[in-house]
Structures are given as structure tokens and as C-alpha cells.
């Protein structure tokens, strides 16, 4: 009986975790139906390399660790940081994340196109945002 109750409790916990994580996007994909997306950041990377949103949408960046992230317009090219804002992109200039759970909304992205954000602290940490 105890094993059955323990198994039931474990399944309930897994169900709660699945439901709680269901609102995030993974891989290359679009955000929620309102054209926005949420992208999580790990120790040294974005959990996904790109996201597609609707014109006028936003991207919410969420830090899942206490690692410091400093996010700006630009990208890493051959291991070298290349700061730079593409025409039509919202300005992101040294948006700092210092604690787990911290989030910031980037946007709105009012121009269709492909835009790039990178973390100046972690080589190779970049996000491509495709606006349709």
C-alpha cells in the first residue's frame, strides 16, 4: 500500500512539473498564440538557439540560474563578440541578469526580419529572433 501511495505521489509531482513547464518554447518555434515567446537562460547558454514570434510581439528572457548574464544586440562570430543592432530591432544594451528567476521583456519587435541578441559574458551564447 505504501509503495502504491508513493508511486501515486511521484506521478502527481511529475504531472505538476509537466504542466508548469508547458508554457515555454523549445527548439525553433513560435511562442504563445499572442505572438510572444519566453526563452530561458541556463548557466552559459540560451535553452534554445532561435525563436519565431509575430510582428509586434515580445520575447521574455528568464534566467534559470544565478549566473550573471549581460544581454545586448549583436552576436558571436567565430568566437568574437560583434555588438550591433539590426535596423528595426528594439535596443537592448547591457540588460543584466544576476539571479535565478529574474526576467526581462524585450520588444516589441515591430519590424519583420531576423534579429540577434548575445550575452557578452558567455562566448557563443546567442539568440536569433525571427519576426514574421
Image (cartoon, rainbow, N blue to C red):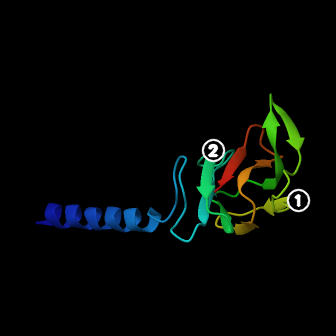
Residue located farthest toward the top when viewing the structure as drawn: 78
Q: Nearer the viewer, residue 14 or 41?
A: 41
* Quadrant location of the C terminus in the rendered image: bottom right
Compared to 81, does 72 lie above or below? below
Residue 35, image quadrant: bottom right
**Residue 63 at what x, y percent from top left?**
66, 60
Distance from the alpha carbon under mark 2 to that under mark 1: 20 Å
Q: Residue extending furthest bottom?
A: 34
Q: Where is residue 89 shown, x and y percent of the image?
A: 81, 58
Residue 45 placed where, x, y %?
67, 45
From this view, report whether residue 129 is shown above or below residue 100.
Answer: above
Marker disc for residue 119: none
Q: What residue is disc 2 on? A: 49
Secondary structure at badge 1 equals loop
Compared to 127, does 22 lie above or below? below
Question: Residue sitting at 81 percent across and 30 percent down?
Answer: 79
Q: Position of residue 59 (x, y in %)?
A: 67, 63
The earlier-in-sequence mark between 2 and 1 is 2
- Seen from the viewer's position, the closer of residues 4 and 65 is 65
Q: Is residue 48 left or right of residue 109?
A: left
Residue in the image at 82% along x and 61% along y? 95
Quadrant where the N terminus is found in the figure = bottom left
Residue 36 sits in quarter:
bottom right
Q: Secondary structure at mark 2?
A: loop
Q: Residue at x 69, y 47 (%)?
A: 128
User: Badge 1 local density, few (<14 within 10 Å), some, or many (20+)?
Assistant: some
Which residue is the site of mark 1? 93
Q: Circle 2: is it few (<14), some (14-19), or many (20+) Cα within 10 Å? A: some
Give left or right: position of 35 versus 128: left
Instruction: State the count of labels.
Output: 2
Residue under the point 64% across and 67% down = 101
Amino acid at each position: 500500500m505504501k509503495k502504491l501511495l508513493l508511486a501515486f505521489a511521484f506521478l502527481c509531482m511529475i504531472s505538476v512539473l509537466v504542466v508548469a513547464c508547458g508554457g515555454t518554447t523549445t527548439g525553433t518555434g513560435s511562442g504563445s498564440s499572442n505572438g510572444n515567446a519566453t526563452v530561458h537562460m541556463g548557466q552559459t547558454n540560451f535553452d534554445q538557439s532561435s525563436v519565431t514570434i509575430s510582428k509586434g510581439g515580445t520575447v521574455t528572457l528568464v534566467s534559470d540560474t544565478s549566473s550573471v548574464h549581460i544581454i545586448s544586440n549583436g552576436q558571436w562570430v567565430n568566437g568574437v563578440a560583434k555588438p550591433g543592432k539590426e535596423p528595426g530591432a528594439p535596443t537592448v544594451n547591457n540588460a543584466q541578469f544576476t539571479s535565478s528567476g529574474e526576467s526581462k521583456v524585450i520588444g516589441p519587435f515591430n519590424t519583420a526580419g531576423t534579429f540577434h541578441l548575445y550575452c557578452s559574458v558567455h562566448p557563443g551564447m546567442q539568440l536569433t529572433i525571427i519576426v514574421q
